[in-house]
Image (cartoon, rainbow, N blue to C red):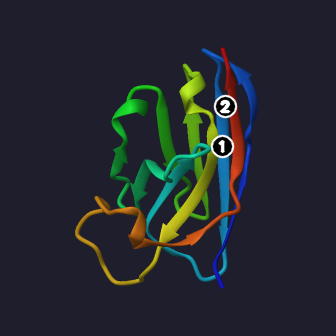
């Protein structure tokens, strides 16, 4: 059974930085892993995805401010967030691929992720 556990969330003022971590244990499919977020009243949206080959994808609103990374074995996933804005406030979720089948790319949608963490709250005040 896959287990994903996020940590590192908290409250910060606009312009500040936070680093999220995700520990991935158990039967985790690691071809593609990523970070999603969900603000109150909004749908869960992709923030960043990283492939086992190191390829990365970001949503437009965080490009240049957030960096996704992993350790070599993809047992830990990171999200470095800087120049934070109030609109970045949300619960941030770590996610892993739903299949062990090879993928040509990690340009995939939310439905392609089958394992999720419980989430960690990020609050950015103005």
Please name the residue shown 62% across and 41% down the image.
90
Give 7 or 76, whichever is nearer the viewer: 7
x and y, in percent, of residue 64 in the image: 40, 26
* SS under mark 2: strand
x and y, in percent, of residue 55 in the image: 33, 52
Give the alpha-carbon distance from disc 1 to disc 2, as whole Å. 7 Å
On screen, residue 94 above or below 31: above
Check if mark 1's residue and mark 2's residue have beta carbons within 8 Å: yes
Give 37 or 19, whichever is nearer the viewer: 37
Please name the residue shown 42% across and 54% down the image.
50
On screen, residue 54 above or below 25: above
x and y, in percent, of residue 30 in the image: 48, 71
Residue sticking out furthest to the front:
41
Give 124 or 42, whichever is nearer the viewer: 42
Residue 20 marker: 1
Q: Quadrant of residue 88?
A: top right
76 left or right of 112 in image: right
Q: Which residue is mark 2?
A: 18
Density class for disc 1 (Cα within 10 Å; few <14, some 14-19, many ≥20) is many
* SS under mark 1: strand
Please name the residue shown 60% across and 23% down the image.
86
């Amino acid at each position: 059974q896959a287990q994903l556990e996020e940590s590192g969330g908290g409250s910060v003022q606009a312009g500040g930085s936070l680093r999220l971590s995700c520990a991935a244990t158990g039967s985790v499919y690691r071809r593609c892993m990523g970070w999603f977020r969900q603000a109150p009243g909004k749908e869960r949206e992709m923030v960043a995805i990283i492939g086992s080959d190191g390829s990365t994808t970001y949503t437009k609103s965080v490009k240049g401010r957030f960096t996704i990374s992993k350790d070599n074995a993809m047992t830990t996933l990171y999200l470095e967030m800087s120049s934070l804005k109030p609109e970045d406030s949300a619960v941030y979720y770590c996610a892993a691929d739903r299949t062990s089948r090879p993928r040509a790319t990690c340009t995939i949608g939310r439905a392609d992720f089958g394992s999720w963490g419980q989430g960690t709250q990020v609050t950015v005040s103005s």
